[in-house]
Structure formats: structure tokens, C-alpha cells
Amino acid sequence: MRVSPEQVSAARRLLGWTQDALAAEVGISKWTLCRFETSNQRPSEWIVLAIRLALEDAGVEFTLSGVKLHNSKATSGIIRAKWDRSRNR
């Protein structure tokens, strides 16, 4: 499922995270995150994946209708391991 800017913004607010906090967690600039959330520019799919994984690791579940907090982090942990391996190639 493709993650929308609105979902990212909603997920971040659901967690009580600032743009600075999410950007730091992902390792991107606040400017990049801000431009994505305001739909001014979509970053690379790798950055969007990193944003999604950071939010999922914090307990967010992305749904067709938006986002919700979810207790199980097992699935995102497996995906994150794959992401980490792919970044180190």
C-alpha cells in the first residue's frame, strides 16, 4: 500500500512526534519531511519506506482509511531487517 502525506502526518501526530523527531528517526532533513507532508514533493520511494518503517516500528498501522496504533511490531521488525540489509549493499 502506498503511504500518503496525510497518513504520515496523521501517524506522526498520533504518536505525538514533531517533524523534527520523525526526521531525526529516519535520518532525513525536516525540510524533506515537511515538503512530503504538504504534498509539495514526493521523496524517493526509499525515503518513503524509511518513514513508513519508523512509524510502524513505533506502533502505527497504516490502513486503507488512515492510520491507527497497533501493539504488534513483529511484522515491521522483519521488514526493517530487510530494509537495513538492502541499504548496506
Image (cartoon, helix red, strand yellow):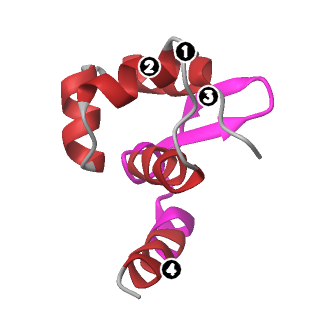
Circle 2 or circle 3, nearest the eye: 2
Separation of marks 3 and 4 at Cα, in angstroms: 23 Å
Amino acid type at circle 4 is Lys
**The one of 19 and 59 positioned closer to us in this rendering:** 19
Residue at screen point 59% across, 41% down:
61
Q: Is residue 58 magenta?
A: yes
User: Which residue is at 58% across, 23% downward?
Assistant: 5
Q: Position of residue 33 (x, y in %)?
A: 38, 28
Q: Is residue 25 above or below residue 67?
A: below
Q: Which residue is mark 3?
A: 67
The mark that comes first in sequence, 1 or 4, is 1
Q: Position of residue 83 (x, y in %)?
A: 47, 72
Q: Is residue 15 visible?
A: no
Question: What residue type is disc 2 on?
Answer: Arg
The CA span between labels 2 and 1 is 5 Å
* Residue that label 2 marks: 35
> Which circle, 1 or 4, is nearer the viewer?
1
**Distance from Cα at disc 3 to Cα at disc 1:** 21 Å
Q: Which residues are magenta?
A: 55-78
